[in-house]
Every structure is written in structure tokens, then in C-alpha cells.
Amino acid sequence: MKIGHILKETSFSISFEFFPPKTPKGEEELFNTIKKLEHIKPTFVSVTYGAGGSTRERTQRVVTRIHRETEITVMAHLTCIAHTRDELKEILDYYKNEGIENILALRGDPPKDGLAKQGCHHSTELIDLIRYLYNNHFSIGVASYPEGHPESPNMEWEIRFFKLKVEKGAEFSITQMFFDNTYFYRFMEELGKAGINIPVIPGIMPITNFGQIVKFASMCGATIPQSLIDRLEKVKDDSKAVTDIGVEFAIKQCEDLIENGVKGFHFYTLNKSDATLRIYSAIRGLINR
């Protein structure tokens, strides 16, 4: 099913993001996680695409397995900067032939060797390519950045570029992770002023590892409230305590978003289910009321 259509019909969306494991054992562990989350009946799940196209085959394999072996709607991430247009067409042809109908169109990071092929320089060009070659076969999602992309000069530019994605054919968006809801509310207000009204799903990252989350936040420019950092630093070597604080924070974050009219969450699971299930269990009543 096409996610763009589903989002128009569902009252509240719950979705999960996975990454393609490097080993067969990791892949089986991932599918055990998917089985645990499947009973929630997520709106969709997505599978990431490595920097420089480094996980092409693994991403395709995991996306295909989810499509064939579960009842879950799946979306494939696709980055364009490291592929020629012919390579992008080959990947998209594969997904079309497999019956995959959803693509998250991304620019992506250049490969580590610095030899970007740049069949498309930006996600907007990838959207153009998909629409030109496949018309409306694919429902296209895009990324959005409540605090601005690390390369954006300012939020005015960020909103203008996001609007261009929508004009090219993006049907919905998933935000980069954020921990201060103020940035999301401000971002949505600016989108409204710009006449942008596609669904924007907040990306929620349950914190289970202090060092890891600090690194992730630094890479993507997400602000972690100092009060949360202070709490986590005191217990950073106690994984259970870190997870408990992270889950508690995410629950409160989601509750505030729901109270302010948000109609969905996209959980960055890091291929684990426990923290996400705890958060969902806590907010389920608010979602279903």
C-alpha cells in the first residue's frame, strides 16, 4: 500500500525505522524485533540506506523480506549522490518489480572515498527522476529538519528547499530526530505560513546509550536539553538507568506532541524493540482516546 494514501485515511500513524544488518545473525535478530513490533500493526516501517550506497544489496534484501514475509507496508530509503542515473533506475526497477510502492528520497552523504557519482545532486532531482520514470507508482517521502539541515545557511532556506520537495512530488515527510519539541512546533508553524500541508511525522529516538546519542545528535545538529544531558551523565555507565531515563523522556516528549495535535510518530529503533514497546505502551491510551 502507498503510505501517502494510508496517511490520509489513518487517524494516528505509528512507524518504525530499521537499518540493514551486516551479518546473517544480525538479520535474524532484526526479524525477531520486527515480529515483536508487528502486533502493534504499524502504519509502515522503513529501511535505511548506507552512506555512499554502501548497503544497497542489504537494504534491498531486508525490504524485500519484510514485503514478502510480513503484512507490514515497507518503505525503502534511497540516497542518490553516490549513484549514476542508470544505477538509480536499476534500483527503482527492482523495487517496482518486487511490488514495493514507497521510497524515502534522500540526497545522502558522499561515499568515504569521496568519489560521488552524483547522478542526482539533491533529493529534489531524485524526486524528479522517480516521477519522470514511474509517474505515480511510488509514494515518495522525504526528510525534514526542524532545527535545520547541518548544511543549511538558515531556516528560511530550509523551508524554501522543503517546499521545493513538495512541489516536485513529495507526499509526506519524516523529521530528523529532535529532543526539544519547541523546534518542531516552530518548524510546523513556518511550514504553515509557506502553504505546506503534507503530513510531517516527528522522528523519535529512544535514548539507550549516552555516548551514542551524543554522537548522533552532534552529527545531525539535534539539540539535547542540558537538563537531560546532566541526568544521563550521572548514570552513563549504567545501561539500564540510561534506558530508563531515555524512555521516560521520550514518553513525556510524545505526550506533549499528542496534546499539541501531532497525529503520528516514527521511531528510530536501532533494530531493537524493548524501548519502543515501552514508549508505545505508555502513550497508547492517548493515541486511542
Image (cartoon, rainbow, N blue to C red):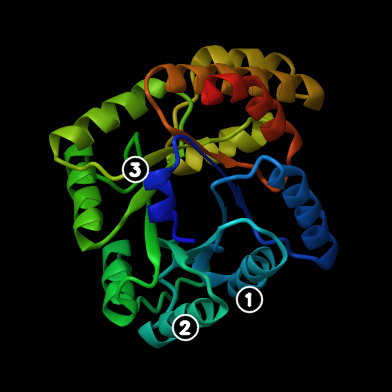
Structural crowding at the residue carrying mark 1, measured as other residues with C-alpha within 10 Å and reported as few (<14), some (14–19) or many (≥20): few
> What residue lies at 42% left-to-right and 37% top-to-bottom?
221
Q: Which residue is mark 3?
A: 199
| Percent coordinates x, y for residue 242 in the rendering | 72, 23
Mark 1 or mark 2, earlier in chain: 1
- Name the element at disc 2: helix
Residues under labels 3 and 1: Cα distance?
Answer: 30 Å
Structural crowding at the residue carrying mark 2, measured as other residues with C-alpha within 10 Å and reported as few (<14), some (14–19) or many (≥20): some
Residues under labels 1 and 2: Cα distance?
Answer: 14 Å
**Kind of residue at disc 1:** Glu
Residue 70 placement: quadrant? bottom right
Mark 3 or mark 2, earlier in chain: 2
| Percent coordinates x, y for residue 67 in the rendering | 63, 66
**Kind of residue at disc 3:** Pro
Q: Which residue is mark 2?
A: 93
- Name the element at disc 1: helix
> Farthest right residue?
25
